[in-house]
Image (spheres, grey):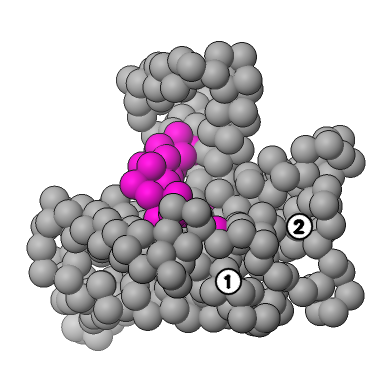
Amino acid sequence: MTNLALAPATTAQSAAIHDSLQRFRRSADWKPLEYLFWCLPVAAYFLFPGNYLLLSQIAVTSLFALSLDLIFGYAGVISLGHAAFFGVGAYTVGLLGLRGVGDPLLGLLLAAVFAAILGFLSSFLLLRGSDLARLMVTLGVALMLYELANKFSDVTGGVDGIPGIEIKPILGLFEFDLYGRVGYIYAVVVLFVLFWLARRLVHSPFGQGLRGIQMNAQRMPALGVPVNRRLVAIYTLGAAYAGVAGAVLAQTNQFVSLAVLGFDNSADLLLILILGGTGRLYGGLIGAIVFIVAKHFLSGMNPQYWQFWLGLALVLLVMFARGGILGTAAKWTESRRQKAARGAGSAS
């Protein structure tokens, strides 16, 4: 009798688990709007032929924002010093270029490795404190690297930076041109490849575990999720992504300065992520597009006070669209769907 009584419940639970797994697998499928989004860089190449350098900056900033979204949007680890990894990647390419090692792909690989090493070593400090302590640790690491780069000017160039970096043609075929065409295509390809990898990651069980850690880290060990190891892994990966972004910037500009390690770089990155929406991958990309384009036009119209208008826009966004652009759009879409469902229910 007991087995018969439990059989329907077990069958129902199995069906629910099966449905959940199917929904989880479908969530990883590419949506039509995603294909449309990735058509934008191709369209921009033909529509804005005189702005390849600006478009390259958008692609690099998008990758940089994606790196922070992995640790902040999915694992809940906030950082005020993410520019440290960005700068490590940029200086890696710069120092390699000075020594005649200008292969772009090798530069990307080494930049990712060195930035990941720094991220791995500093990640253990993050596990010891609260969110405020983590902010201070990340900021402290970035400030120390900034001062080290400024102090050892014989190696880094100090305030003068590293100009004239020698970057060889990509795969020995595609040489970086003065107008930035090849640099833009290169930056977009790197962005897309790393975005694709990040997308697969966040839609995997590993990514779902990160979301669980963000919501309630204390309960996750009961589900068999090693919280500390997951945080170390994602922080290291985010650092590697930021290092690649810095490397692409150095390769496309063929110049590295102390600004890549500056606090402004980290602060702008947080603004970009909040503007687009955290924990959505595309939030960082859309935020980077809006931020860079707004900065470009506002600084052109009012070079002295453009930051006031940008700050005002960000304040209004926080007041009336707390989830950022994508979060607000998702809430609006869900609200319309619920209203349509209620209307259909009342009509029937």
Distance between the alpha carbons at the discs numbered 1 and 2: 15 Å
Question: Range of the magenta residues?
Answer: 256-281
In the figure, is residue 325 to the left or right of 134?
Answer: right
In the figure, is residue 231 to the left or right of 29?
Answer: left
| Mark closest to the chain's N terminus, 1 or 2 | 1
> What residue do we see at 60% from left, 53% from top?
60
Q: Quadrant of residue 50?
A: top right
Q: Quadrant of residue 109?
A: bottom right
Q: Quadrant of the N terminus?
A: bottom left
- In the depicted structure, whether residue 231 falls above or below residue 36: below
Contact between labelled residues 2 and 1, with CB atoms less than 8 Å apart: no
The majority secondary structure of the magenta stretch comes to helix
> What residue do we see at 75% from left, 62% from top?
186
Measuring from the top left, give residue 39's x and y in whole percent.
Answer: 79, 47
| Residue 267 included in the magenta stretch of the image | yes
In the figure, is residue 211 to the left or right of 303?
Answer: left
User: Of 314 and 326, which appears nearest the observer?
Assistant: 314
Measuring from the top left, give residue 345's x and y in whole percent.
Answer: 51, 26
Mark 1 residue type: Val
Mark 2 residue type: Gly
* Secondary structure at numbered mark 2: helix
| Residue 264 included in the magenta stretch of the image | yes
User: Of 70 and 56, which appears nearest the observer?
Assistant: 56
Residue receiving disc 1: 93
Residue receiving disc 2: 183
Q: Is residue 338 visible?
A: no
